[in-house]
Amino acid sequence: MARPDQEDIEDGTIAVMLERSRRRIPNLLAIKEQLAAGGTLGELEIAHLEEIFEGANRILAIVEQHPELQEISAKIINLYTEIMDMAVANAEKG
């Protein structure tokens, strides 16, 4: 069997990234809704957000090379930032 070339690897990484994004966005929105209601983050939510942040850092180089991925990536990063800002504000209140 032939070994995959760099383009095949990037295509696979992009496919996985898009699938993960499709699954993660509803979870992120649920966390944001919880925070909007005045809630705080539990250990599970914190671990989930850390996983998303670490994943974003790992694929940054690929996103920079593929402009078609930049919009969805920016939206996820903005959502992540909103969540973190809300979490900090709620923790300071509570």
Image (cartoon, rainbow, N blue to C red):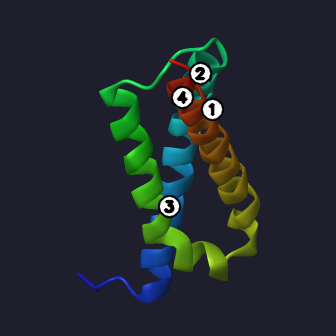
Q: Residue 82 sits in which quadrant?
A: top right
Is 83 placed left or right of 1 in the picture? Answer: right
Mark 1 and mark 3 in contact? Answer it, CB < 8 Å: no
The nearer-to-camera label among 1 and 4 is 4
3D distance between C-alphas at marks 2 and 1: 6 Å
3D distance between C-alphas at marks 3 and 2: 22 Å
3D distance between C-alphas at marks 1 and 3: 20 Å
Please tell me whether mark 2 sits on a helix, a strand or a loop: helix
Which of marks 2 and 4 precedes in the sequence? 2
User: From the viewer's perspective, is residue 30 above or below residue 56?
Assistant: above
Q: Residues within 10 Å of mark 2 (few under 14, many from 20)?
A: many
> Residue 63: percent from the left, percent from the top?
61, 72
Is 37 placed left or right of 9 in the picture? Answer: right
> Residue 5: percent from the left, percent from the top?
40, 88
Mark 1 and mark 4 in contact? Answer it, CB < 8 Å: no
Mark 4 and mark 3 in contact? Answer it, CB < 8 Å: no
Which of marks 3 and 4 precedes in the sequence? 3
Which of marks 1 and 2 precedes in the sequence? 2
Residue tagged 3 = 56
3D distance between C-alphas at marks 4 and 3: 27 Å
Mark 2 and mark 1 in contact? Answer it, CB < 8 Å: yes
Which of marks 4 and 1 precedes in the sequence? 1
Identify residue type, mark 2. Answer: Leu
Which of marks 3 and 1 precedes in the sequence? 3
Residue tagged 1 = 86
Q: Is residue 25 visible?
A: no
Q: Residues within 10 Å of mark 4 (few under 14, many from 20)?
A: few
Residue tagged 2 = 35
Q: Residue at x 64, y 11 (%)?
A: 37
Residue tagged 4 = 92
